[in-house]
Amino acid sequence: MATQETVDHKYVYDFAEGNKDLKDLLGGKGANLAEMTNLGLPVPPGFTITTEACQAYLATGREPDGLAGQIEAHLESLERGMGRRLGDPHDPLLVSVRSGAKFSMPGMMETVLNVGLNDRSVVGLAAQAGGNERFAWDSYRRLIQMFGKTVCEVPGEEFEHALDEAKRARGTTNDLDLDADDLRGLVDAYKKIFLKHTGRDFPQEPREQLDLAIRAVFESWNAERAVLYRRQERIPADLGTAVNVVAMVFGNLGPDSGTGVAFTRDPASGAQGIYGDYLANAQGEDVVAGIRNTVPLQELERLDKRSYDELLGIMARLEGHYRDLCDIEFTIERGKLWMLQTRVGKRTAAAAFVIAGQLVDEGLIDLDEALHRVNGAQLAQLMFPRFQLDHDFEPVAKGVGASPGAASGKVVFTSARAVELAAEGEAVILVRRETNPDDLNGMIAAQGILTSRGGKTSHAAVVARGMGKTCVSGADEIDVNVPAKRFSVAGQTVNEGDVVSIDGTTGKVYLGEVPVMPSEVVRYFEGTLDPDEADDALVKAVHRIMTHADAARRLAVRANADTGEDAARARRFGAQGIGLCRTEHMFLGDRRELVERLILARTDTERSDVLAALLPLQRDDFVEIFREMDGLPVTVRLIDPPLHEFLPPLEQLAVDVAVAQERGEDVAKEEALLAAVRRMHEENPMLGLRGVRLGLVIPGLFAMQVRAIAEAAVRVTREGGSACPEIMVPLVGAVQELETVRAEAEKIIAEVVGDSGVEVLIGTMIEVPRAALTAGQIAEAAQFFSFGTNDLTQMGWGFSRDDVEGAFFWRYLELGIFGISPFESIDRDGVGRLVRIAAEEGRAARPELKLGVCGEHGGDPESVHFFHSVGLDYVSCSPFRVPVARLEAGRAAVETVGSDSR
Ligand code: PEP
Ligand code: MG
């Protein structure tokens, strides 16, 4: 007969049963603890409760059937292995209960240490620790504090106040100066706080403590800050967290114990070496919380050489095993090293490139994998400006360069104020002694983060690096006074609202706004920095990986550029053509008057006069662009927006006319203009007279543009250059629209081009859903399609692109209806399906049909992968996004196994 255990779904895995590839089920922490266990590394024994158990709990509000029994069985086996029982009064086994989702969410969810301690086992623990009462009572007070805060939502400040009070009574500021009696008193105080807030005594039953802690970890998946972090990092909302129950080892047993975090390479720069922080006589959360200042890991060599050597050996082994930078957490209990965590570590954008290059050199990975290890978002970060080298500012403080970048902004001291000022469009620098997970909102809103405590592994540093925010941590010359909203440094006082600049690479802090310059990476892309000569490891690594991406990618990358200057920049950044030259800006400025005349024209002659005046101006515009793009294709889109956009706003004009009439002035011209504006007014201009519709309604308008394009191409060719124009008709929904425009255009082209050898293609945007759905017909009349995914998204969803993002997307994001705005990243299932259908049906009708995309999505990393997968020929994006699109197109082409670059 099957036992209950075998009938039940398996929700609990011993560390020996898992491995690093089971992150979906066991979370990152659990999977890696299992991996280390199986590598024979010193991991305290324990087990992992799966993410499926969490998902079931969150769906139903109760533990799934069978979970309690499986926990019981695994706990018993843990107790057997350790030779101790949970909370035994004489010789207690204590456990930690730790969250661990598939993707690391530093500090966002909960951990409870020392579970199993109560009024009786605290005595046993002291005895077991060789009569170390101080240690036992310190551990107990930590349990009540963490359990109270995490499981029962007791406000954390109350415990902190009580701790401050105990230190004050003892005349110290260091918690290490509190003795066993002080801590015993503190436990009493904590229990009272617990009772006051929960209406019950602190639970003495160890198993109840364990069950409640597990439940609290499950629930912390949906804590506000975790939800916010997931949204920021685009982590799916339905993954749930695993829970790790691990036998406690103690770093707070005395000076021969301690705890630390380390990286196998510098997560900020990628430089090889040992990076980490160590804190003697402490438990893990003290390091990450930045409560006490840590010492560099190298100090451990002096303090405990044996553990240090063992740690270095393990770190080298982990790097080789994971073939990547690893970060680790460890504890030393009375000279015995224990590994508490490892994972492929988060790193800055610069470090990601540098490390990928190093690992290729070391033969650990190949170039395809190196390409997979970096991403477009990181490259975009590296293109942000940095501080000028020759500025006259003197630093007022220096901390740890925790997350690089150059940030200037107004000083704020609270997360709320950061959010407030950022909403008003101000750049702010969030200044704290140290951050904690509740500061997440402010960190997202700020340009940069400055703390006076904590090292490279403090909360601020880890989270800022994950977000790509500039951060200087541990600038201890700065004395932060949050209630007074000021900090003092080098004899000066800096108040809220004063401007400071922080350099996340050097760790330097300046008063005032330090001027910025283009980053090295931009200089490299612009061709002003030769990678072979640069002594910068980053530029060399970027060059190497970009070269590989360019060789690997199938998608071409073009740019959206409307001027010669933009075209030139795009070309320097590696654009292989222009995918969208919008012509509307060519009707603005001092040409507005001509456009007004065009709109007001009452006769054909008046209209053709204006068009004749516009023709040479347009021709010059195109000549400039064709010259810059010599030999590369340039897609010119005929005018798209409604003409009234070129006229003055209705209300303003009406007021001006009324005032002028009142004064008795001659307003015949203005009245005619007003009448035209009224006539052209549309309730839904985005769905009105624009694009091809305009071309069909205003005689001669498109014809003038076509002629200007063809004449410009002929001129550039006659000069000895090479122009490859592609004329693109916007907003087509039916093949008949395109056929009509095309018939007229072909006549003009034939007439202008003659025997010059210029070839002009005619194609269309696919940006109206009907066009996508009738692509087979439209392809009969088009030599190319370019997907206008901005309008396709607008019309596919029925979302006004000008209004909805500000109006209600926040609610849609909150509800998880989508994880990211569909205007930012292509909605694969809906709008993407339209693209796929149009690509397939268009190609079926005309196999040589050229396919591209020119909506904003062309520069979005995720979307580039989609466009690769549907077989487009190119993506087109703004010039600054061109390198990002090149990289992502390369990544899409080599998409293989390999580690997750998140
Ligand atoms: C589009 O709709 O995606 C597009 C590129 O055109 P525009 O943004 O100019 O409407
Ligand atoms: Mg459009």
Image: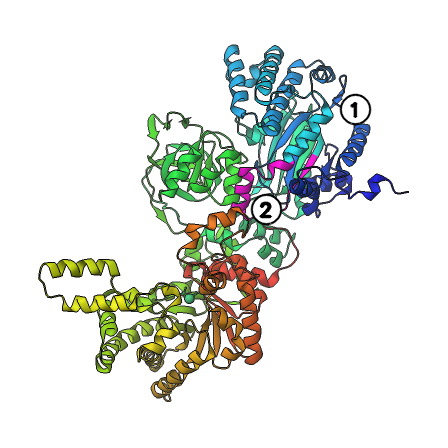
Q: Position of residue 468 (x, y in %)?
A: 49, 45
Q: Quadrant of the N terminus?
A: top right
Does residue 19 appear to the left or right of 329 in the view shown?
A: right
Task: Using the image as rendered, state which of residue 612 and residue 459 is in the foreground.
Answer: 612
Rendered residue at 38%/43% (across/down): 423
The disc, 1 or 2, on the residue closer to the chain's N-terminal end is 1
State the image quarter where residue 85 is shown. Answer: top right
What range is drawn magenta here? Answer: 218-244
Q: CA distance from mark 1 to mark 2?
A: 38 Å
Whether residue 227 is in magenta: the answer is yes
Ligand 1 rendered quadrant = bottom left
Is 89 drawn above or below residue 447 in the view shown?
above
Q: What residue sits right under mark 1 in the picture? A: 84
Marks 1 and 2 close (CB-CB < 8 Å): no
State the image quarter where residue 360 is shown. Answer: bottom right
Does residue 568 appear to the left or right of 835 in the view shown?
A: left
- Disc 2 marks which amino acid? Ala
User: Residue 237 — which label?
Assistant: 2
Question: Residue extending furthest left?
Answer: 664
